[in-house]
Image: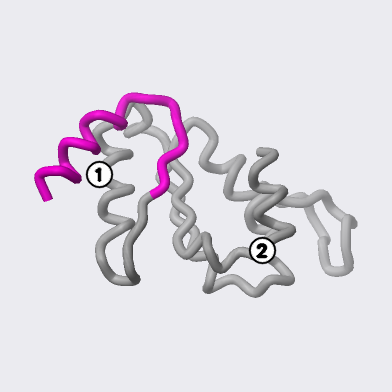
Amino acid sequence: MKKVIDQLKHVSNTNTTVLILGESGTGKELVARALHQNSDRKNKPFVPVNISALPESILESELFGHEAGSFTGAMSKRIGKFEYANGGTLFLDEVGEMPVDTQIKLLRV
């Protein structure tokens, strides 16, 4: 646990992407929240997204948003989680469950 806390202190004030690994239920979101609360982003949004809880058909729209009329049922513009978390922290839980084509788009953000 001390190693985790030391690493949190080391990366909390850097502007970098952090990959938190661990089995389901081991506290990855707690670590992400601790990182957020100890960073310069603490007054900005913390946006958790459980990838495995979202159907593949709406995943991209949830993450990246959409314009009105961009697909059937898109009646109005919707901002995505990336835009909502802008300046804060976006926590993608179960990111390994994300389809490969969406992972590629994620790398371009």
Find the residue positioned furthest to the left. Answer: 2
Q: Is residue 75 above or below residue 46?
A: below
Residue range corresponding to the magenta coloring: 1-19
Q: Nearer the viewer, residue 97 or 82?
A: 97
**Nearer to the camera, 90 or 65:** 90
The residue located at (25%, 66%) in the rendering is 26
Q: Position of residue 76 (x, y in %)?
A: 79, 55
Instruction: Name the N-terminal-most of marks 2 and 1.
Output: 1
Q: Position of residue 97 (x, y in %)?
A: 56, 68
Q: Amino acid at mark 2?
A: Leu
Query: In percent of the image, x 32 and y 25: which residue is there?
Result: 13
Viewer-side residue, 3 vs 37: 3
- Residue 80 spot, x, y in % from top left: 64, 49
Residue 96: % across, % down = 53, 63
Judged left or right of residue 91, residue 40 is left
Q: Secondary structure at mark 1?
A: helix
Task: Using the rendered view, name the quadrant where residue 51 is placed.
Answer: bottom right
What amino acid is at disc 1? Ala
- Whether the magenta-drawn stretch holds residue 12 is answered as yes
